[in-house]
Image (cartoon, grey):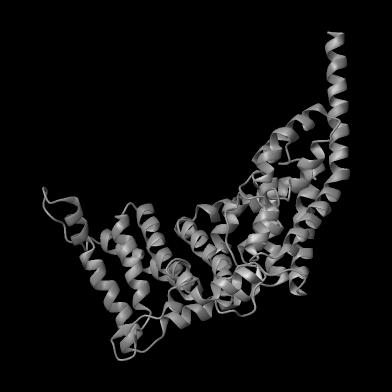
């Protein structure tokens, strides 16, 4: 097992660490994370519009259009918000003006969508091109806009204002030439040449999105995240940089289907992992904490008491670094096997319609049964599945924790014997 940790430390960790520190991926991660409050609040209006109780649903039905307005102007414009935020963070990483980077990124993204004539009243942008389904377009155009901005800056293709001019004015003139490059390029390609940038980018990433909704696409991030955490690396942060745009596209499709009253299509958006796999935190360590409460080893029992409340809120750093689970050969196997097992059981439970697929993004610190119930739009079967998953991971952790417990007791007895000799 130690040889395995050495291999991970030699090959996996350096690669994943470089990936997490890659400038563009970091900007994508930070940019998308900044939109999460809008997504959470906006998606909650779906629960209000489609309550799980039939009696209340009948009362709400005449007002669904108005109730869904906050959702349409938050979650429904997620890619638009993300384009600005990604551009801002990427520009700041280059020590460029973040505000200009955000504005140029958003302008480049909007230029990929051709307005349509709306009932003879003028032009209108289709909101379907501005939501989560267009997240990859927002990412690509934000990177393009900021890289043009950086190119102009390094080549001194900027207008420099004299000293004494307010910073806001100076920054706007610095962005003038990059803007004069970005807007015409996108316009020439999109409108004069007739090349549909938006459709092309979506087509490039569509296989990735489809793969992310398969059992393999679900198990791969589970395995990588667990391996990274087992070696002390924040796995969610690293993998999320790459996978979160895909998860949000799947979530956007689910939300759009729910808002239209259609069947939920996708199993694998982020709430799938949050509420049914990472119960108690990465590694599904809620089962480990419950066992620690009954441990005969005083250290494990006291740590279990201290870790219970954080575990209920899906915070497990005290367990990973306190037990420790990290670099612990006795606990590595269940730490990896537990999320894989319940990931498979959850996938097939949703695949066969035993539990509703998730379409609501709710705060990740809620207890798992509550979060799962809300994420599935009020499906009580989600609570049952979470409890079944907790039972499974508790059983998987049990023999390994007992072995570790015996090891700690032996070491404690040996320590007391040495103290008596001294």
Residue 337 percent location from the top left of the image: 79, 54
- Can residue 25 be seen at all in this image of the molecule? no
Image quadrant for the C terminus?
A: top right
Residue 140 percent location from the top left of the image: 43, 70
Residue 421 percent location from the top left of the image: 87, 9
Depth check: give the residue in front, 135 or 4.
135
Residue at 65% of width from left, 53% of height from top? 12
Residue at 66% of width from left, 63% of height from top? 272
Depth check: give the residue in front, 169 or 266.
266
Please give left or right for residue 23 compared with residue 2 in the image.
left
- Can residue 320 be seen at all in this image of the molecule? yes
Q: In this view, does 310 lie above or below 64?
A: above
Residue at 73% of width from left, 33% of height from top? 305
Please give left or right for residue 369 compared with residue 115 in the image.
right
Which residue occupies the extreme bottom position in the image?
120
Give the quadrant of residue 418: top right
Q: In this view, does 345 lie above or below 278?
A: below
Residue 91 percent location from the top left of the image: 35, 57
Please give left or right for residue 152 compared with residue 246 in the image.
left
Image quadrant for the N terminus?
A: top right
Depth check: give the residue in front, 5 or 52.
52
Give the quadrant of residue 323: top right
Total marks drawn? 0
Q: In this view, does 162 lie above or below 132?
A: above
Q: In this view, does 202 lie above or below 333?
A: below
């Amino acid at each position: 097992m130690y040889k395995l940790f050495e291999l991970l430390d030699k090959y996996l960790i350096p690669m994943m660490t470089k990936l997490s520190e890659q400038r563009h991926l970091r900007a994508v991660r930070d940019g998308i994370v900044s939109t999460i409050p809008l997504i959470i609040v906006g998606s909650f209006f779906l629960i209000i519009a489609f309550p799980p109780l039939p009696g209340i649903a009948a009362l709400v039905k005449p007002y669904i259009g108005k109730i869904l307005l906050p959702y349409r102007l938050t979650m429904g414009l997620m890619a638009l918000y993300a384009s600005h935020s990604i551009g801002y963070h990427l520009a700041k990483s280059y020590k460029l003006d973040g505000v200009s980077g955000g504005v140029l990124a958003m302008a480049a993204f909007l230029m990929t969508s051709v307005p349509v004539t709306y009932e003879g009243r003028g032009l209108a942008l289709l909101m379907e091109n501005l939501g989560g389904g267009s997240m990859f377009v927002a990412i690509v155009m934000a990177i393009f806009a900021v890289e043009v901005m950086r190119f102009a800056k390094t080549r001194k293709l900027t207008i420099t204002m004299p000293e004494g001019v307010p910073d806001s004015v100076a920054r706007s003139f610095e962005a003038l030439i990059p803007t004069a490059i970005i807007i015409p390029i996108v316009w020439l390609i999109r409108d004069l040449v007739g090349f549909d940038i938006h459709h092309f980018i979506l087509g490039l990433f569509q296989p990735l999105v489809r793969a992310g909704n398969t059992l393999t696409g679900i198990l791969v991030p589970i395995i990588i995240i667990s391996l990274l955490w087992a070696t002390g690396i924040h796995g969610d942060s690293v993998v999320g940089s790459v996978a979160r745009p895909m998860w949000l596209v799947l979530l956007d499709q689910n939300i759009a289907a729910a808002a239209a009253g259609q069947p939920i299509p996708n199993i694998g958006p982020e709430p799938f992992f949050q509420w049914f796999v990472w119960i108690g935190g990465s590694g599904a360590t809620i089962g480990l904490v419950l066992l620690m409460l009954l441990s005969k080893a005083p250290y494990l029992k006291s740590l279990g008491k201290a870790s219970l409340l954080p575990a209920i809120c899906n915070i497990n750093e005290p367990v990973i670094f306190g037990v420790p689970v990290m670099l612990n050969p006795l606990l590595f196997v269940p730490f990896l096997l537990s999320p894989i097992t319940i990931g498979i059981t959850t996938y097939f439970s949703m695949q066969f319609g035993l539990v509703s697929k998730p379409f609501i993004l709710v705060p990740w610190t809620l207890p798992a049964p509550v979060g799962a119930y809300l994420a599935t739009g009020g499906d009580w079967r989600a609570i049952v599945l979470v409890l079944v998953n907790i039972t499974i991971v508790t059983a998987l952790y049990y023999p390994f924790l007992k072995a570790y417990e015996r090891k700690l007791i032996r070491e404690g007895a040996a320590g007391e014997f040495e103290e008596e000799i001294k």
